[in-house]
Image (cartoon, rainbow, N blue to C red):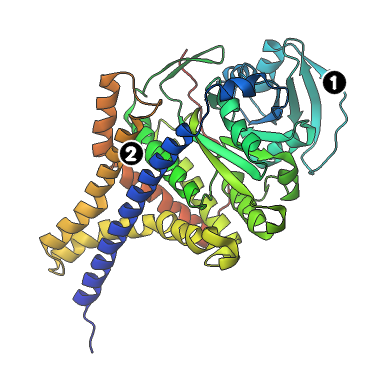
Amino acid sequence: MNITPAAVIHMLLMAAFIYFIVLHCFYFFFIALGALGQRSYHQGIQFGEFKRISESPLSMPISITIPAYNEEKLIINTALNMLNLHYPQHEVIIVNDGSTDQTLQLLLDKFELFPIQQSFKKHFETQLIRKIYRSHTHTNLIVIDKENGGRADAINCGVNLSRYPIVCEIDADCVVDKNALLYMARPFLLNRHVIAATGIVKPSNGLVVKDGEIISRGLPDKLLPLFQVIEYLRSFQWSRSGLSKIGCLLCMPGAFTFVKKDIFIKVGGANTKALIDDFELTVTLQRYIYEHKNEGDLSIAFVPDPGCYTEVPETIKSFNIQRNFWQRTILQSLIWNRDMAINPRYGMVGIFGFPYFFLFEVLSPVIEIGVILLAPIAYFFGLATLADIGLLFVFGILMGSLTSVFALLLQEKTRLREEKMSNLMRLIIAAFTDHFGYHQIHMFSRLVGIFQLLFLNDTSRTSLQRVGFKS
């Protein structure tokens, strides 16, 4: 039987059509599952529970580690935000990772830092520590000045000096709700088998922040970060919540991750060889869970309550750099841990999680950009009809927009809903239009990232230019 070029083109287009249907069905399923998980979470909270956590001397102390490299526009607000969180006992460890701007000097001046001699157990080898400082004004603040070694190296350095049983990793461009530690400590207190936890992360662009306190929650003024608000809502809030419900969470955002210190040490800490350590750390923790079943029913918790806000790119250049970087990170980790893929030993993570991330996180830019290039060529040469192109358009673009609107409307049932109708309308418009241009730019950035990692072995890291909070 002869297979003609027309038949090949037709089969590829139909395969893409089926791919888009399955992709958006999964999105709808995970968003719905995440919404049910959030409802169940809130129904399980007892009256006065967080008040008891905030007042109990038995609440587990938390060490917050903040890696900082050239963060002069944000570091003071972030530090004040962390220091003023409502929790019985926590320390803040800022690791100045060889900054070349005013990051360290701003900290020295603002918090009246003075050098100290401090002994600690060196769990991880890190770049050379120049000095360790403590604050005259905030006794729970430590600042470490060290040679540059990257984010993972800075986190490991902070953990070396940490004193408490739970370690919180948070980026220097983040601020969180005042009660965030209470929410995040809860799963550890309720279940001793919880080894790590993460929560909701949202863009901070549009927040008004003064002295580390969130004054108001607005939307970004620019279109690019507004589209990212929708993306974070759809992909990083609801979808991750849904994946966690079936035990397939493979990426705890580095912007907001909590891990038991003893487990963090056992798995070797943050991987300094990884492009970014958050995805690799999550996969490593999942591996630990299934390879240490003798320790009990270990798990990673997703807390659909606290709001952590992180700055997102406001220029196409920065956006391309970030998404290219993220794509290389995911692909690198999946390759490193490929022995877990479709492996029953690793439960749902191996059987479903790895195939899902490979098919719909790694391959999606290849397929979507391929269809964008192939469809008009096929139509021009008479190898596809307008009906074929229309189906691809409906299921590749319109269904994506409907998924975004679905995620947005579900958020309006939560405490994170928009207070102003004008803001809600802006988000609805963005949700309907984010698959018309923004999504394609996103896919192209990721496609380039795949090419650079697989064919150029590009493991370079690029820092993003910061904008800073509104004040």
Find disc 1 in the rendering and name its residue: 116
Name the residue located 73 percent from the left edge and 23 percent from the top edge.
Answer: 143
Depicted 376 relative to depicted 177: above or below: below
- The reply, left or right, for residue 151 in relation to residue 304 is right
| Badge 1: residue crowd in 10 Å (few <14, some 14–19, many ≥20) | few
Quadrant housing residue 371: bottom left
Name the residue located 39 percent from the left edge and 40 percent from the top edge.
Answer: 35
Depicted 12 relative to depicted 263: above or below: below
Position in image of residue 16 (x %, y %)? 28, 63
Quadrant housing residue 278: top right
Find disc 2 in the rendering and name its residue: 407
Question: Nearest the camera: 183 or 454?
Answer: 183
Amino acid beneath label 2: Ala
Position in image of residue 212 (x %, y %)? 56, 15
Question: Nearest the camera: 291 or 58?
Answer: 58
Mark 1 residue element: strand
Q: In terms of sequence position, does the residue under pointer 2 or pointer 1 come before the other? A: 1
